[in-house]
Amino acid sequence: MANTRVKFETSLGDLLIELDDAKAPLTAKNFADYARSGFYDGTIFHRVIPGFVVQGGGMLPGMVEKDNGEPIRNEATNGLRNLRGTLSMARTSDPHSATSQFFINLVDNAGLDHKSPVGSGWGYAVFGKIVEGMDVVDAIAKVPTGMRPPHGDVPKEDVVVLKASIVS
């Protein structure tokens, strides 16, 4: 069976994301469900750190946080690595707190990989990768950022997900 693919139409261009349904089944389904429901439509990439990650999936313009669903179990033990172009779930210090927010790795980020099932060793669950549009991700990474208290690394001009849709 082919992996689920999700198209993000953004204000800077389109991204085609392929989910790893076999190695990250809970996380891939969670992301696809949010996309299918229209949750990501109108959200912004609210955290941009060049040479590290771009993060989105939970904020509207003006840094208004969206209400989201229940947290999912961290699948960082799946063997997938935080390499350039992969998507991982954002979370709090609780390893099992991911909901809708995700990040795209701009570089290989081995420090975010699973090392042990305790504390900071949990890592961040990789669940997909960009298969088309990495140039768009790189363009997002070049957007000027600043403080939007209490948040840092916030794009000064919104980069908006206009529409997210399941394409296969």
Image (spheres, helix red, strand yellow):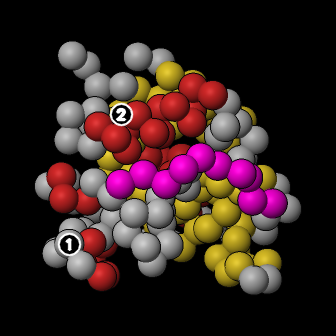
Q: For marks 2 and 1, give the CA distance.
A: 26 Å
- Residue at the (59%, 46%) spot, across then down: 69
In which quadrant of the rendered view does residue 45 lie?
bottom right
- Does the magenta portion include 99? no
Relative horizontal placement of residue 34, taking residue 78 as reference (left or right): right
In which quadrant of the rendered view does residue 38 lie?
top right
Determine which residue is flagged by label 1: 117
Q: Nearer the viewer, residue 142 or 84?
A: 84
The residue segment tinted magenta is 64-73
Q: Nearer the viewer, residue 146 or 151?
A: 151
- Does the magenta portion include 72? yes
Decide: is 29 above or below 107.
above
Q: Dot 1: within a 10 Å radius of its alpha carbon, few (fewer than 14), some, or many (20 or more) residues?
A: few
Q: Nearer the viewer, residue 30 or 111?
A: 30
- Residue at the (75%, 83%) spot, across then down: 150
Determine which residue is flagged by label 2: 18
Query: What secondary structure characterizes most of the magenta part?
Result: loop
- Residue 100 in percent (x, y) is at 55, 50
